[in-house]
Image (cartoon, rainbow, N blue to C red):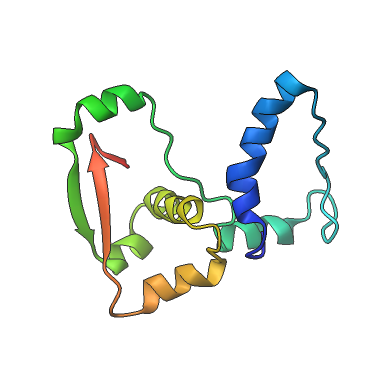
Amino acid sequence: YEGSSNGFLVRAVPRLRAASRKQGLRLLELRSPLRWAAGCPLEALSRSALLLDAAPPHVQDAAATARDASAAVLERLDRSSLLEGDEQNLMELYGLLRQGHYKTKPSDLETFLDAPGIIWIEMRQNGQNL
């Protein structure tokens, strides 16, 4: 991750994988990290601490979500609730940010949680982040 190539991973790789089924492209993927030994607990700790695996929520039925848009609500979040509350919610919100902006880096999360002028607003529908 390290703040580079995330846009490529988020946007291009899924399209290349879809196209490879049709056009005979071959994608090669590094399975073992160069810096870490397989199963290294320090890697797991760093990935968890920096939310490197944070992903946006999966929307089960996008068509139904769109049809029921009137049920969506905007909520202002208290920063302390993000830190002390549901870790899954924080990971989903950060995952949305990572997917929405390819230059997002782990230190951005610290800024968003510490800076007094930043306001977090989330859109929820039926208890799920959108």
Question: Left or right: where does residue 41 sit relative to residue 83?
Answer: right
- Residue farthest to the left, as pictured: 70
- Which residue ends up furthest to the bottom in the rendered image? 116
Name the residue located 82 percent from the left edge and 58 percent from the top edge. Answer: 36
Q: Quadrant of the N terminus?
A: bottom right
Q: Nearer the viewer, residue 2 or 20?
A: 20
Q: Is residue 70 left or right of residue 86?
A: left
Residue 113 vertical placement versus 41 (above, below): below
The image position of residue 5, as x and y in percent, is 67, 57
Please identify the residue farthest to the front as the structure is shown. 23
Q: Position of residue 76 (x, y in %)?
A: 20, 60
Name the residue at 30% across, 68% down: 80
Instruction: Estimate the x, y position of residue 73 in percent, counting from the top left.
Output: 17, 45
Kindly identify the residue that appears in the image at 85 percent across and 55 percent down. Answer: 37
Residue 112 to residue 95: above or below: below
Q: Quadrant of residue 56?
A: top left
Q: Position of residue 24 (x, y in %)?
A: 80, 23
Question: Left or right: where does residue 26 sit relative to residue 49?
Answer: right
Say which of 92 and 27 sits in front: 27
State which quadrant residue 121 falls in.
bottom left
- Please identify the quadrant where the C terminus is shown: top left
Q: Residue at horizontal 58%, vertical 44%?
A: 11
Task: Tell how many labels.
Answer: 0
Q: Is residue 41 above or below residue 127?
A: below
